[in-house]
Amino acid sequence: MREPDFHDLRETLLRGGVAPKHVRRTIAELRDHQTDLFGEALSRGCSFEDAEREASMRLGDEDALAAVVLARPELQSWTHRWPWIAYGVTPTFLLGLAFVTLVLLLGFSDVVRTDQHTFSERWGSPESVWSVAGAVRMFASFGLPMLLAATCCFVAAQRRVAVRWPLIGVVIASIVGAAVQFNVAWPQGPDVSGALAVRITVPPFPGSVGAMLRATATCALTLGPFLWWKKRVARA
Amino acid sequence: MERNNSPFMSAVPELLLLRLLANEELYGYEIVRKIREATGDAISLGEGVVYPVLHSLEAAGALKSRRRVVNGRERVYYSATKSGRTRLANLAAHWTRINDGIRLALAEMTHA
């Protein structure tokens, strides 16, 4: 039997807001069911083609199946039911939580409080220390917003969501990410402790070209591939 | 049989599924086959229609499922939970009342 792919059904369900896990499961079970129906028809002496036709007919046409699934709101994903929370509130909350976690981790890890001597023993040469500091700063100000914006696009792509929602999520992640400026000053000597500094600026970030650039880059690097993918899928 | 999607009939698949799964663990294809046998083909659903109903009942806590490999194929087996059996009792009582009401009404119409 030709393996049915239920492509149209999958697309209809995802566009209708059904949670991807329910879509995957429904299609896997329908596929199994169709195989059973096909086997049953063959065992009754039907020809290969007749068995295939009968199996499809008994399973029901894809429009009818889609209508039954879409009529059940309990199978819809929460991101479809509350897109403002999914793409508006969640990125802001997660980004804030990530910043707070990072500050607490660094603050309590004793790294910035140790003097240069013990710090170098732990981290190696001063060069590697500065590269660790740079990496942390880079991760906080660019990596985290980028990760979150990319997640918004991925979730939206997986759920075939209208472009406006990931757009909102990406813009929020980019702006919040750029608004928070994270600085780590490592210990400079035996009596000079390091410091963590978190500064929040308000868009349009006066005097901070870096923040503007970061926000623009985050938008471009996440929305660009997402829109390209959407266009490609629409053409296919 | 003509398919009927009216709200009145929408609880029928749920009732039948809960009744079947109250005492045994079955997978989708077996469930549909047993429904056909149990109702003497009086209720014929597009067979794929059972899956959304099964998933909804599971989401509501009325059913539980587990994967089992049988003859080299992985299948999802469903069975009723305690809450599912309570739901079945309520649904069955509801349908019995409706059935009694319709029988009475039909009997009155015959006498009139």
Image (spheres, rainbow, N blue to C red):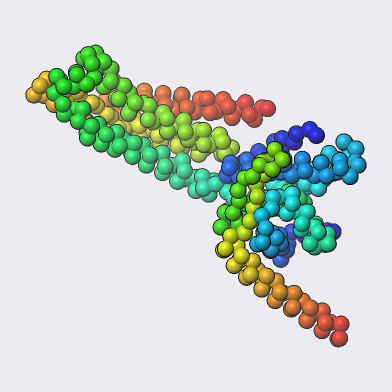
For residue B70, above or below residue A127: below
Name of the residue lying farthest toward the left: A191
A220 left or right of A236 in image: left
For residue A113, above or below residue B80: above
What residue lies at 59% left-to-right and 67% top-to-bottom? B86
What residue lies at 58% left-to-right and 48% top-to-bottom? A76
Work out whether residue B110 or residue A92 is closer to the camera in this orientation and state it.
Answer: B110
Q: Which image quadrant is residue B72 in?
A: top right
Expressed as whole percent of the image width and height from the top left, the position of residue A56 reads: 80, 42
A129 left or right of A26 in image: left
Q: Is residue A33 visible?
A: yes
Q: Is residue A13 visible?
A: no
Work out whether residue A199 or residue A106 is closer to the camera in this orientation and state it.
Answer: A106
Quadrant where the N terminus of chain B sits is bottom right
Quadrant where the C terminus of chain B sits is bottom right
Expressed as whole percent of the image width and height from the top left, the position of residue B42 reads: 82, 62
Q: Which image quadrant is residue A210 in?
A: top left
Name of the residue lying farthest toward the bottom: B112
B100 left or right of A209 in image: right
For residue A140, above or below residue A169: above
Expressed as whole percent of the image width and height from the top left, the position of residue B46 reads: 77, 51
What residue lies at 65% left-to-right and 62% top-to-bottom? B22
Expressed as whole percent of the image width and height from the top left, the position of residue A204 reads: 33, 31
A167 left or right of A207 in image: right
What residue lies at 51% left-to-right and 48% top-to-bottom? A78
Work out whether residue B109 or residue B72 is closer to the camera in this orientation and state it.
Answer: B72
Work out whether residue B5 or residue A102 is closer to the camera in this orientation and state it.
Answer: A102
